[in-house]
Amino acid sequence: MSGYRRQLPSMTSLVVFEAAARQKSFTKAAAELGITQAAVSRQVQGLEENLGFQLFRRLHRSIELTARGLSLSKSMSEALGIIAQTVQSITDESKPAELVISASVAFSHFWLLPNISDFRRANPDVKLKIVTQDSAVNLLREDIDVAIRYGNGNWPDGKAIMLFNDDIFPVCSPGYLAEHGAPDCVADLARHNLIASDSLDSSWTGWEQWLSAFGHSSDPRNVTLSCNFYTDAIYAALRGEGIALGWHRLVSDLLRQKQLIRVSSESVRTRHAYFVVLKAAPARKPAVESFLAWICSETNGSTATLQNSPF
């Protein structure tokens, strides 16, 4: 049986191609690899000649992957990601265990950080790094062990395990409630100052979706304050600026401490759920298994299939 070397083109050209495909630019790939743009072009052209077909369509000031190029790009990204993970794993064997966790700003601030001390006490030898950002990280390409995400559970870069759905209802500060009173019903929310949090995620439940679940439309005039981040919307509610939508799992501590008050018995179940997503790797760090057991226990998470509903 012949070795891989005879079956594969130049590994240099494949690595250069992967960078160009990922960056969608010969120039950006050259900067990443520390070579010239002309060298990237030569490597890609040589690879195309070796394979006997085009990998890119050269457009005016841009490049575009062909169908075959896209297929090769996906395989190269996955293969290089696995190699990088393995190299890091065997390199880090002599170093203290480190667990890198990615989470959204809201989940990190309102749930993960308030609860992580329990995990740290049970696992004192694990060094934690929490990467907080709302944009999704790619587990195949980035140095992340575990990601906590809200969505439908279908992500190509890892194995998703459901943690929980959530319930959403209006909340405000005790001061706002004392000054303005509680709404008598859902329709009565129209006379209150509503605080919104914007999201590019279509599955996110904002005021428009929440009110429509009860047969009401959201009048933009009622939203007197809009924030880019959910954390900012909750802080505005804490300061008495109006009524925000509280995600029960995220604001439960604030409700328990009576810093926020629930002002309506009506609630809406989230469209999707929170998941813990594990990087696909030849062998997971022991710390990953410990974290998975801990967070599933804390949230009563399970591997049950999520049953989608309108909300």
Image: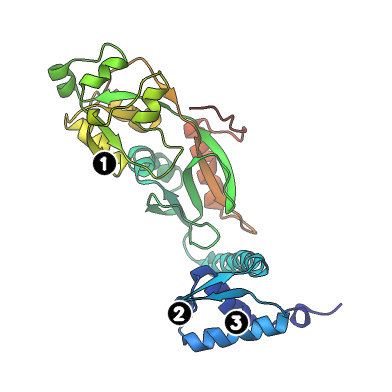
Dot 3 lies on which element?
helix
Q: The residue under label 2 is which amino acid type?
A: Thr
- Eyeballing the image, is 212 above or below 132? above
Dot 1 lies on which element?
strand
Q: The residue under label 3 is which amino acid type?
A: Val
Q: CA distance from mark 2 to mark 3?
A: 13 Å
Q: From the viewer's perspective, tell me whether residue 305 is left or right of residue 146.
A: right
Residue 214 in percent (x, y) is at 40, 18
Query: On the image, which quarter does residue 121 sit in?
Result: top left
Q: From the viewer's perspective, tell me whether residue 270 is left or right of residue 216.
A: right
The residue labelled by disc 3 is 44
Dot 2 lies on which element?
helix
Q: CA distance from mark 2 to mark 1?
A: 37 Å
Colour approach in the figure: rainbow
Residue shown at 32% from the left, 16% from the top = 186
The residue labelled by disc 1 is 227
The residue labelled by disc 2 is 27
Hey, which residue is sitting farthest left in the picture?
179
The crowd level at tag 2 (other Cα within 10 Å; few <14, some 14-19, many 20+) is some
Q: From the viewer's perspective, tell me whether residue 245 is left or right of residue 11.
A: left
108 or 21: nearer the viewer: 21
Residue 7 in percent (x, y) is at 77, 79
Q: Label 3 near label 2: C-beta < 8 Å? A: no
Number of marks drawn? 3
- Eyeballing the image, is 69 above or below 273? below
